[in-house]
Image (tube, rainbow, N blue to C red):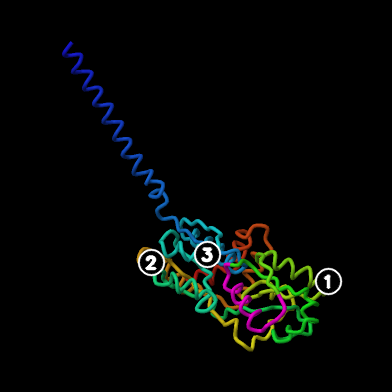
Amino acid sequence: MTKRLTLFLIFFLTVLFIFFSGCKKDDKGGAGKKNSRKGVLTILYPNWAEGIALTNLAEIALEDKGYSTEIKPIEPGPIYASLAEGDCDLFLDAWLPHTHKHYWKKYGKHIDRIGESFSNGRTGLVVPDYVKENSITDLKSRKVAEKYNNKIIGIGSGAGIHNNTTKAIKEYKIPFRQITSSGPAMIACLKKAYDDREPVIITGWKPHFMWARFNIKFLKDPKGIYPKDVIATLSRKGFREEYPEITSFFEKFNFTEKQLNSLMDAVGKADDPADGAEKWYNKNKQLIKSWW
């Protein structure tokens, strides 16, 4: 009886040991869902033409060098917050120092700026070139405003250009209201009006494929509500030390207006942005190779 009890206890303790050893491994790998993703680079981007294009191209370039990546669309505010918390790795579409200054003021000390993908960013109010108005000051008349249905077609309220347009309406005292939509919806409104040669005002920016597809112009901004910016590449703290090769790549990841417009046009015309980016990547491999 004693022998049987001893054997039973040995067996029981062995089972317990195996069980708890397995639990320990599960705990590591269940903190392990995080560990299993180690080395996966997370790039966040807003639903803007240049952000979509730059991010999809970067994903292809990185994966071609053997890095694992994940890209996610999200509003700019949460992107800055995620970078500051270290919950993502990169953001390639930061409009600095002006358009995103409120985000930079809040989160900038917890984020690193590692590059500049475009050096001549511009935002403002955009109209077709067939309309007579050339300046925001030309919009003060109620008669002119009615021609545009008193509307300025904008994008998401989290965008810096949205805030600047709210400011412009107030500063210039123009009888307009800003319609909040999205980048694609705004372009759809522009296209419909353009095809019908109707007046329309949108919140526009360079770089964007709209400049390759439509004959349009910025309205002059004598009060300087819409300042010029660069499109900066941002990373979480510590990224530079962990990924020196990738950091070096993004330090050189810089486009001319012609290059970036052609990339955005290729991405914008494709059914899947990744397909358009890959097509552009294959045509411009020498350029991208030089950044490594």
Q: Would residue 117 be seen by someone viewing this image from the given angle?
A: no
Q: Main secondary structure of the magenta part?
A: helix
168 displayed left or right of 84: right
Residue at horizontal 70 percent and vertical 73 percent from the top: 177
57 drawn magenta = no
Q: Position of residue 197 (x, y in %)?
A: 82, 75
Q: Disc 1 residue type? A: Asp
Please report whichever mark, 1 or 2, sits nearer to the chain's N-terminal start. 1
**Cβ atoms under marks 1 and 3 closer than 8 Å:** no
Q: Position of residue 224 (x, y in %)?
A: 60, 86
88 displayed left or right of 128: left
Q: Disc 3 residue type? A: Ala
Q: Is residue 260 above or below residue 224?
A: above
Q: Nearer the observer, disc 2 or disc 3?
A: 2
Considering the image in quadrants, where does the N terminus appear? top left
Density class for disc 2 (Cα within 10 Å; few <14, some 14-19, many ≥20) is: some
Q: Quadrant of residue 144?
A: bottom right
Residue at horizontal 50 percent and vertical 59 percent from the top: 64
Q: Disc 2 residue type? A: Lys
Q: Dot 3 lies on which element?
A: helix
- Residue on which the image places disc 1: 196
- Residue on which the image places disc 3: 58
Give the residues in magenta. 158-176
Q: Is residue 149 above or below residue 73?
A: below
